[in-house]
Amino acid sequence: MTYSELVTAIQTYTENNFPATTLADSTVVTSTTQINRLITQAEQRIYNSVQFPSIRRNVTGVMAYNNKYLNCPTDFLSTYSLATIDPTTGAYTFLLNKDVNFLREAYPTPTDLGAPKYYALFGPQSGDEAELTFIIGPTPDASYSVELHYYYYPESITTAITTWLGDNFDTVLLYGSLVEAYTYMKGEQDLIVLYDTKYKEALALAKRLGDGLERSDAYRSGQYREAPLPQNTGIR
C-alpha cells in the first residue's frame, strides 16, 4: 500500500475528506496535515509495539583516543549492541551495557585508559540537547573503530511514499490510522471499538511476524504444527 492508497482508504472508510480547518488564531490546518498526523501517530504506535527488522539500523564510527564520550546518531532511540572492531583481524568485541553510576565508580577519573569494555547512555550532547551521547569505560587508550546497532523510527510513509510496513503489513497501518482518525473525528463509540479491535487483531499478526517468525527458523525452533482434527472412526 502506497501513501496515496492509504490516504484514499482512510477517506473512504471514514467517509471524510478532512477539509481544511481554521483555528481560533486563524491558523489553517490543511487536509494533508491532518491526515499525515493521523498516519504518523499510527506508525509510532506500531513501531513501539513490534520490533520489526526494518526498524534496526547499524552504523560504524570511531571512538577517539582519550575521549570517554561517543555521540549517538541523530535518529537514535535505543541500543541493540555496540562493539569495537579489531583493525587487523576484523574481530568484534561487544561492550556490556551498564549504568552511568557503575562507570563513574569503576573508572572515577578520565585518565583511566584502556580497551573499552562498558558503555552507558549518558544523556544529551553538550552541543545539542536534543541528541544523546554514550559514556565509555574505561576511556579509550587508542582510536577504535566501532559498530552500533540501534532502534530508530524509519521514514514515514507520508514522505517516503512507500515503506516496508506499507508493502508488507498494510492492514496494521490502515487500521491503526483509522483508530487515530475516528478518535480525531470524535466518531461513534461502536466504530472506534470496531476499528480498535481490527487494529489489535492485525497487530497480533504483525507481532507474530516481527517478534516471532523473523527471530527463529525451523532448524533451531522447529516448525509450528496444528493439532490434527479428530478422525471419524464411524463409531457413534
Image (spheres, rainbow, N blue to C red):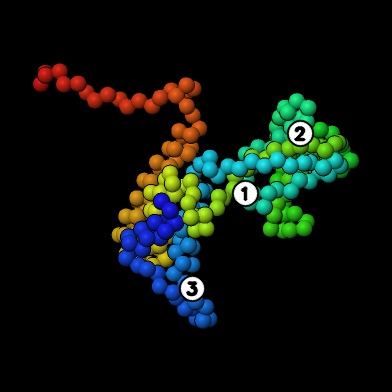
Q: Determine which of the numbered discs, if any, sits on residue 29 in the image.
A: 3
Res. 41 visible in picture: no
The residue that disc 2 covers is 117
- Tell me the amino acid under the disc marked 2: Lys
Marks 2/3: CA–CA distance: 51 Å
Q: Determine which of the numbered discs, if any, sits on residue 77 in the image.
A: 1
Residue plotted at (15% across, 18% down): 233
The residue at the far right in this view is 111
Q: Quadrant of the C terminus?
A: top left
Check disc 3: other Cα within 10 Å, few if <14, some if 14-19, many if 20+: some
- Tell me the amino acid under the disc marked 1: Leu
Q: Judge left or right: residue 184 versus residue 232.
A: right
Q: Are marks 1 and 2 in contact (CB under 8 Å)?
A: no
Residue plotted at (75% across, 54% down): 125
Residue plotted at (79% across, 36% down): 144
Marks 1/2: CA–CA distance: 22 Å
Helix, strand or loop at mark 1: loop
Check disc 1: other Cα within 10 Å, few if <14, some if 14-19, many if 20+: few
Q: Is residue 79 above or below residue 74?
A: above
Residue plotted at (32% across, 60% down): 13
Helix, strand or loop at mark 2: loop
- Choose the circle earlier in sequence order: 3 or 1: 3
- Tell me the amino acid under the disc marked 3: Val
- Work out whether residue 10 or residue 234 is closer to the camera in this orientation and state it: 10
Q: Determine which of the numbered discs, if any, sits on residue 228 in the image.
A: none
- Work out whether residue 205 or residue 29 is closer to the camera in this orientation and state it: 29
Helix, strand or loop at mark 3: strand
Q: Quadrant of residue 18?
A: bottom left
